[in-house]
Each structure stands twice: as structure tokens, then as C-alpha cells.
Image (cartoon, rainbow, N blue to C red):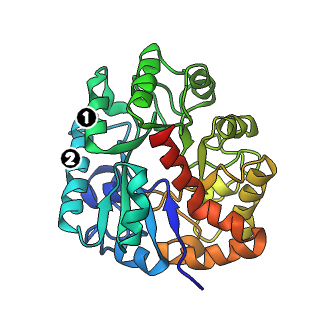
Amino acid sequence: MPDIKVFDLHCDTIDALAFGDSGPFVGFASTEGDLVCNRLALGIDRMQTVGPWCQCYAIWVPDQLSELTPLQFYRQARDYFHTQMAAHGDDVVQVRDARALDEVLASGKTAAMLTVENGSPVGSDLGVIDEWAADGVKMVTLTWNGKNSIASGHDTTDGLSTFGRQVVRAMEDRRIVVDVSHLNDVGFWDLMKVVRRPFAASHSNLREACGHKRNLTDDQFRAIRDMGGIVGLNYCTGFVRDNAWGADEVSFDDVAAHIERFLDLGGEDTIALGSDFDGCTPPAWLSTCEKLTPFYQRIVVRFGESVAQRLFFENAHDFFVRNETA
């Protein structure tokens, strides 16, 4: 079987490695190593055995921080990421413009896109968005679970703030993709009143297949589809099947139910992978990057080669190229 091409919209590997001995990251199986070689779900040395791979590496900024401000936290993780890019240039390249992606992958190197999960580092300063753009950030999840100056996550009830509307416009002007994963329903529909460019739900499943409020409604998925956006399939067991939070509680059929509904909603060109690796409990059979190969094969059997290629790589690739050119 030829190499599989993979484009994954979300992982938390940067946090696990940069902050693995502190705060919410204590308890990972092992945070020793670096981006290339580690014992986490994603290691570039193992990703390269699967095939050409573009990974969106998120800097997750927790809602509650005790020692650092959100902006300080972001900068510390960003510096770690850039240090890793410099140290491992023979293996991985940061992609700041998706039009360079094919050349990077053809060279045999892994492509890395820097993203942010939780827009809280912006605080009240739109200048932070310029900093993100200079750092090569390509996508920002507006919230995590709580409320920040931009909007409210799914554990809170407020919508998009007046300042948040300015943030969205500034991100769009700099071609930083707006990401609505974690955003609550009120905030989503507030966003639809102001958004001008295609946007993403980097790691969100469908509420009709699993009722968790972190998942998208059918109408929200249609709105993203109609805007030319992208939605990443989340492997987290609790977002795949109701009341399933253990690694052995979710089957391939449970995951396939989300894909089937995505397709029933006309999402063949909208779906992508949004693993949430190193930030969630995935099914045991989909727990590390090496297991993408048998997963791909099962998707081909169930849905066909075309759907598999679009889900695993083509849709995300085309979305980010359009983001640079449209």
C-alpha cells in the first residue's frame, strides 16, 4: 500500500512537551523527549513511517493559570516550538504559507503549522494578533471552555463580545483562520453575523451522533460547509459516543457514525482530521500516530478511497491553500 498523506488540524503535543512537569499537564504517560522522538501519541520519527504528514501544533492556553499570564504562557510555548524547528530542520519545517506545503512534503520532511487554542493571550490588545502573524500562527481557536475577552466557551453562556468582533476582523485581515471548536452556540451564531472568510472547527464532532455540547449541531456544520470551511474529526472518546470516556469504550463503528453523518450533510469536501492527540483519551485502536495506517484502510473499506483521501489530507490542504489565495 502506498504512503498515506495526513493533515491533522489539532494536537496538544507542544504543551505536553513544553510544560509536561507542571499544572494541568502532570499525569501524561511520558513527556520526555522532543517533537521528533518521544513517548506521546505524536512523534515525528513515527509519523514519517505512516507517510507525508502536515501537523497543526496547537499552543493550548488553559483558562486558569497561576504563574504566567496567558500571553506569557503563549510566548513560552511559541519559543519552544521555534527552538524545535531550528533544532530539527532535517526532519520538520514550519509552514507559514500553505502554498509551500507540497514542496516541504516532497522533500521528505514533516510540515508543521503553528496554531493557538484559546484566544485569551490577546487580552485587550489587538497588537497580539500582529505578533501571532509574525510568529507564523495560522489558526486560532477563539475560546477554550470558559470565557475570555473575545467570546465564551461551551461551559459559559455569553456570546461574541464587541471586542471579539474586532479580533475576528483582525485575524481575517492577517489570514489567521478563525476556529470555533469550544465556542458555545450563542457565540457561534454571533460569529456568523460578522465572519467574512471561511473558518474552521478544528476538532469537533457532530451532536446528532454524540450529544456532548462540545460537538456541532447539524445547522452549525452546514454553516461551516456553506462558507467553504473545514471540520476536523475529534478522536476523544467522550466526543465520539455518549458517556464514553475510556480508551476501550469506543469502536470504529462509533467513529464512522460521525463520518457517515458528515457525508449525509453534504460534507465530503468539508471533513478533515482533528485528532486532539496528546490532549485527550482516544480509542485504544487509534491512540498513536502509527495507528493511522489501519484506520485509513478501514475508512477506505467503509467509505471508499476518494473519501479517505479527502478526510485524511486533501480537504485540509485545499482549505489552507485557499486561505492564502482567496
Under mark 1, the amino acid is: Glu
Point out residue 273 in the picture as x, y percentages from the top left corner.
57, 58
Residue lying at the far top of the rendered structure: 162
Residue 147 occupies which quadrant of the picture? top left
Which residue is drawn at the image coordinates 53% and 59% (left, top)?
275
Q: Is residue 248 visible?
A: yes
Mark 2 falls on what kind of element? helix
Nearest-to-viewer mark from 1 and 2: 1
Point out residue 260 in the picture as x, y percentages from the top left corner.
77, 58
Q: Are marks 1 and 2 in contact (CB under 8 Å)?
A: no
Q: Is residue 277 left or right of residue 314?
A: left
Which residue position is annotated with label 2? Answer: 76
Q: CA distance from mark 1 to mark 2?
A: 14 Å
- Front in this rendered view, residue 54 or 70: 54
Numbered label attached to residue 122: none
Residue lying at the far bottom of the rendered structure: 1
Vertical comparison of 169 with 305: above or below: above
Which residue position is annotated with label 1? Answer: 131
Under mark 2, the amino acid is: Gln
Which residue is drawn at the image coordinates 18% and 61% (left, top)?
86
Q: Is residue 309 left or right of residue 170?
A: right
